[in-house]
């Protein structure tokens, strides 16, 4: 299905709709829209059995209005140049929307990672990193990759190690990539950040009574029935934190099919089942769904597509029953389908805002690497001492004695994970208000995606104009 839609064209349709509300030279807008640098790399891989295979890969830097550029590396059989360009563009808009000071980029290696041994994946990752380095497509101040579909902390550790070996003595070399294991310069909370950000964003959206009323929904996530498409890093963590907030998981799908249960699905038991069986289909007590797409059409309040692009199309959009769509994936809704849903009054919380938690926490990791000190290290003990003095003063003023347990809760100093989550929550809440305000400034004539895109384009345009990047 994804082949019917050119992903970059879909992104650009929503760009054009928003650009109509931006007061800028149309030629400059054309420049903002284009990808600044597109790098195609093919290299040979020696497989474990001695045979040779050609690996195709891409790195696209969409916008240099801020540097470094930033974005993940995807390992998937479906990767192609058009997809990587679209994803790189989305990174530019995403960073701008949440005030993360990077340009957008993306990488992709056209392989099904499940078909390769760990050793082969390591050789692919190191060679890809070397190819990036050779052409100045990687570096803490140039372009900083991160995980995406099919990659994770293990691959990022290989990227960092390869880059560091090529740049011995470069003090900030660890900041060449984010999403590293915590033991290798990563930051606490990065792995779960995108899913956590999705839930912070949905919590913010659902806290506004005025916006919930037309959807006939109460405020808050508690009791909301939701469906998630995709059980990868984003889908799993989004579902986990939704459940923590009191929401009920009524449907799940992954590439092999799905399951539904209107009374709720136990996520951890489901994950254990999938680990054992290799699929969610057949999970006891839940009805099987014929395909990954079928889950999109289930009865629910909130639908979270957290798999691939172009999943919600004009073909299935009329059958979608969710009142609110929270885009965990990049580009899950085609432009036409999006317009159909908006006309029906569905509230879409767009990808360029909602899934920006990953890059936001990547920004924190990059800062940590440049600072060479973990968050909280300097102030934790000082804060604890200050809180303890306050507790003692309260005790002597009131004559009440706190228990040891109460005292330890009241005097806890923030650790790195607390600060990362606090920074993420603030980023998501603030950006949502900015998007809503922009929508209001446009007299509610546009949807949230267009409002977010207008904000993003404006920021990029201002950078171009103020920096005067016109040789
Ligand atoms: N791959 C993630 C995304 O699509 C994260 C990018 C990053 O952390 O740089 O947003």
Image (spheres, rainbow, N blue to C red):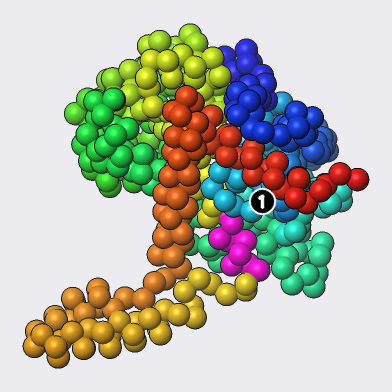
Residue 391 position (above or below residue 433): below
Left or right: 204 in relation to 170 = left
In the rendered image, residue 363 lying in the magenta stretch gets the answer yes
Q: Quadrant of residue 238 in the image?
A: top left
Magenta region's main secondary structure?
A: helix
Q: Would you name the residue on which mark 1 appears?
A: 102
Q: Position of residue 451 (x, y in %)?
A: 52, 33
Residue 376 position (above or below residue 322): below
Q: Is residue 171 visible?
A: yes
Q: Where is residue 300 in the image (x, y as percent from the top left)?
A: 29, 24
Q: Does label 1 point to a residue whose CB lies under 8 Å from ligand 1?
A: yes
Which residue reaches farthest right? Answer: 471
Magenta-colored span? 362-370
Name the residue: 22% across, 83% down. Answer: 391
Q: Where is residue 66 in the image (x, y as percent from the top left)?
A: 71, 51
Name the residue: 29% across, 25% down. Answer: 215
Name the residue: 46% across, 14% down. Answer: 340
Q: Nearer the viewer, residue 356 or 436?
A: 436
Give the crowd class for mark 1: few <14, some 14-19, many >=20 residues within 10 Å: many
Q: Where is residue 377 in the image (x, y as percent from the top left)?
A: 49, 78
Say which quadrant the C terminus sits in: top right
Give SS at disc 1. loop
Q: Which of 432 and 285 is in front in this view?
A: 432
Say which quadrant the N terminus sits in: top right
Which residue reaches farthest bottom? Answer: 396
Name the residue: 10% across, 85% down. Answer: 398
Which residue reaches farthest left? Answer: 399
Q: Is residue 282 visible?
A: no
In the rendered image, residue 385 lying in the magenta stretch gets the answer no
């Amino acid at each position: 299905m994804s082949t019917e839609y050119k992903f970059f064209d879909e992104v650009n349709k929503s760009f054009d709709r928003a650009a109509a509300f931006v007061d800028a030279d149309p030629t400059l807008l054309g420049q903002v829209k284009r990808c600044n640098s597109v790098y195609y790399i093919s290299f040979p891989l020696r497989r474990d059995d001695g045979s040779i295979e050609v690996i195709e890969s891409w790195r696209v830097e969409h916008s240099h209005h801020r540097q470094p550029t930033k974005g993940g590396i995807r390992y998937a059989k479906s990767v192609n140049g058009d997809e990587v360009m679209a994803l790189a563009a989305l990174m530019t808009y995403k960073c701008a929307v949440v005030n993360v000071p990077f340009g957008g980029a993306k990488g992709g290696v056209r392989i099904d990672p499940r078909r390769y041994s760990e050793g082969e994946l390591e050789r692919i990752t190191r060679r890809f990193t070397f190819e990036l380095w050779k052409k100045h497509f990687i570096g803490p101040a140039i372009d900083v990759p991160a995980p995406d579909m099919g990659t994770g902390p293990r691959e990022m550790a290989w990227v960092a190690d390869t880059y560091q070996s090529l740049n011995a003595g470069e003090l900030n070399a660890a900041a060449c990539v984010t999403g590293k294991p915590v033991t290798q310069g990563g930051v606490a909370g990065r792995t779960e950040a995108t899913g956590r950000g999705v839930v912070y964003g949905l919590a913010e959206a659902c806290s506004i009574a005025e916006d919930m009323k037309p959807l006939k929904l109460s405020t808050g996530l508690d009791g909301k029935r939701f469906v998630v498409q995709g059980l990868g890093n984003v889908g799993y963590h989004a579902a986990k934190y939704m459940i923590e907030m009191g929401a009920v998981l009524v449907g799940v799908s992954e590439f092999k099919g799905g399951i539904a249960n209107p009374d709720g699905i136990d996520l951890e038991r489901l994950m254990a089942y999938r680990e054992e069986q290799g699929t969610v289909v057949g999970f006891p007590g839940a009805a099987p769904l014929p395909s990954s797409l079928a889950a999109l059409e289930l009865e629910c309040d909130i639908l979270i597509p957290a798999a691939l692009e172009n999943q919600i199309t004009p073909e299935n959009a009329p059958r979608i029953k969710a009142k609110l769509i929270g885009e965990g994936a990049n580009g899950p809704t085609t432009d036409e389908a999006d317009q159909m849903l908006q006309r029906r009054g569905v509230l879409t919380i767009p990808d360029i805002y909602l899934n920006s938690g990953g890059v936001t926490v990547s920004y924190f990791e990059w800062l940590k690497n440049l600072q060479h000190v973990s968050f909280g290290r300097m102030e934790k003990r000082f804060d604890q001492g200050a809180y303890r003095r306050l507790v003692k003063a309260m005790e002597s003023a009131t004559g009440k004695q706190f228990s040891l347990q109460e005292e330890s809760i009241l005097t806890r100093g923030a650790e790195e994970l607390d600060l990362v989550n606090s920074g993420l929550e603030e980023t998501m809440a603030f950006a949502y208000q900015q998007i809503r305000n922009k929508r209001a400034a446009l007299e509610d004539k546009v949807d949230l995606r267009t409002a977010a895109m207008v904000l993003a384009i404006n920021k990029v345009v201002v950078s171009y104009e103020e920096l005067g990047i016109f040789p």
